[in-house]
Each structure stands twice: as structure tokens, then as C-alpha cells.
Image (cartoon, helix red, strand yellow):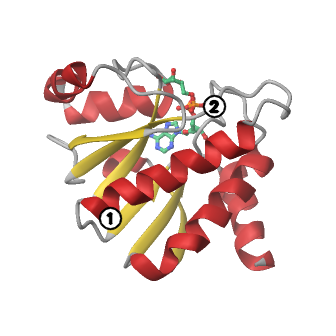
Amino acid sequence: MIEVIRADITTLAVDAIVNAANESLLGGGGVDGAIHRVAGPELLAACRPLGGCPTGEARITPGFRLPSSWVIHTVGPVWHDGARHEAERLAACYRNSFELALQHGLRSIAFPAISTGVYGYPKRRAATVAMAAMHEYVPRFARIIACCHSAEDLQIYCELLVSD
Ligand code: APR
């Protein structure tokens, strides 16, 4: 089932939390910064040899000091105008993160609202893409969590959950 909650994703004790990273995988602000802060320096050390990650793809590392066992790093699209395959690339982030979790036998996974912060993806459009991908994978996970950081995000996801 899909759970929609308002929380700081770095507090969630699930098999994997997903990080909205950038292509360097060397940290940043937003949720990326929060995850690296809590995970500790070992996370950056584990990311360095990965050599970055193209937009839409996903990479996995241990969670180190985080309560989650793993971190799945994915790189969302920067929003331009919606005509540059942003929706397909965002959907790929969710699908590739799910597939990587399945390859590692993980059963619970939490996502932030990828691309909706610094990368400027309109929140409702992004939530629609996220929820569609989550529904595809519901049968294969014990827990799928949409982890909203703001009340606004929570409202958007809850409306979509009800409308399904
Ligand atoms: N827990 C859950 N969600 C969070 C947290 C947190 N601790 N902190 C921020 N968020 C939410 C934001 O409110 C936003 O809804 O994560 C969502 C994604 O926002 P960003 O973190 O800005 O990520 P994104 O828009 O994908 O931009 C990625 O930002 O931090 C840099 O290195 C990152 O360059 C990359 C870019």
C-alpha cells in the first residue's frame, strides 16, 4: 500500500530512503544535504567511487548513520517547460529506484518529492507522476511511503490518494 506522511525522511526506519541527488552524487542542499548530514561522511565516501549518476537513473549505497539500511540516490529532471521529457525522466527516477530496491530484496521504501525543490518541478504534476509509478509497484513492496516535507506537499499527495 502507499502511505502518505509528513516527515523528515532522514528519520524513517525503512529498508531504503530515496535521495533527490544531482548528477555528481557529491551532495548538495535540500533533502540531499539533510541525508548526507545525518548519514555522516561515510556516505560521501561511498558515493565518490560511483562516478556520478545520469538524470533518471538510480544508485544504491548503505545508509550508514541513518535509521534506513540503504539510500537509493536518483537524479530528477530540472523543470524547464514540460516539453523536454521532464515527466518521462521523473517517472524513470521512481521506476529505477523501485527496480534497484527489488534487486536488493528490499520491501519498504520512502520517497521525497523528487525535483520539486531546487529543480523547480511543479508540485502537483510531479506528485501525479510519483503516484502513478508507486501504484505500479504496490504489489511488490510491503511499504511504499511518499514522504512529504511541507503541509502543502502533504495536501497535494492526499488529494491524489483520495482521487485514485
Ligand atoms: N525530508 C523529506 N523531504 C525533504 C527534506 C527532508 N529532510 N528536505 C527537503 N525535502 C523536500 C523538499 O521540500 C522538496 O519537496 O524534498 C523535495 C525535493 O527538493 P530538493 O531537495 O530541492 O531536491 P530537487 O528539487 O530534486 O533538487 C535536487 O537540489 O539539494 C540539491 O544536490 C541536490 O542538486 C540537487 C538538487
The residue type indicated by label 1 comes to: Leu
Which quarter of the picture shows residue 37? top left
> Which residue is pictured at 67% across the width and 65% down the height?
132
Q: Which residue is mark 2?
A: 77
Residues at circles 2 and 1 in contact by the CB criterion of under 8 Å: no
Count every numbered label the image shows and give the total.
2
Q: Position of residue 96 (x, y in %)?
A: 46, 50
Q: How many residues crowd around disc 2 within 10 Å: few (fewer than 14), some, or many (20 or more)?
A: many
Return the residue at label 1: 102
Residue at image x 54%, y 74%? Answer: 2
Relative side of 59 to 22, left or right: left
Where does the image place residue 82, in percent across and percent down from the top left?
Answer: 84, 34
Q: In this rendering, is residue 161 above or below 51?
A: below
Q: Is residue 141 left or right of residue 86?
A: left
Using the rendered image of the protein, determine whether residue 13 is visible from the camera's viewpoint. Answer: no
For label 2, the SS is loop
Viewer-proximal residue among 20 and 58: 58
**Residue 54 at x, y percent in the picture:** 47, 27
Does label 2 point to a residue whose CB lies under 8 Å from ligand 1? Answer: no
Label 1 near ligand 1 (CB < 8 Å): no
57 or 6: nearer the viewer: 57
Where is residue 52? Give x, y as percent: 36, 22
Query: Is the residue 15 above or below the residue 23 in the image?
Result: below
Is 6 situated left or right of 62 in this image?
right
Please state, as top left, top right, bottom left or bottom right, where the C terminus lies in the image: bottom right
Q: Mark on residue 143? A: none
Q: CA distance from mark 2 to mark 1?
A: 23 Å
**Residue 71 appears in view:** yes
Disc nearer the start of the sequence (2/1): 2
Disc 2 residue type (three-letter): Pro
Q: Where, by quadrant of the figure, is residue 64 drawn?
A: top left
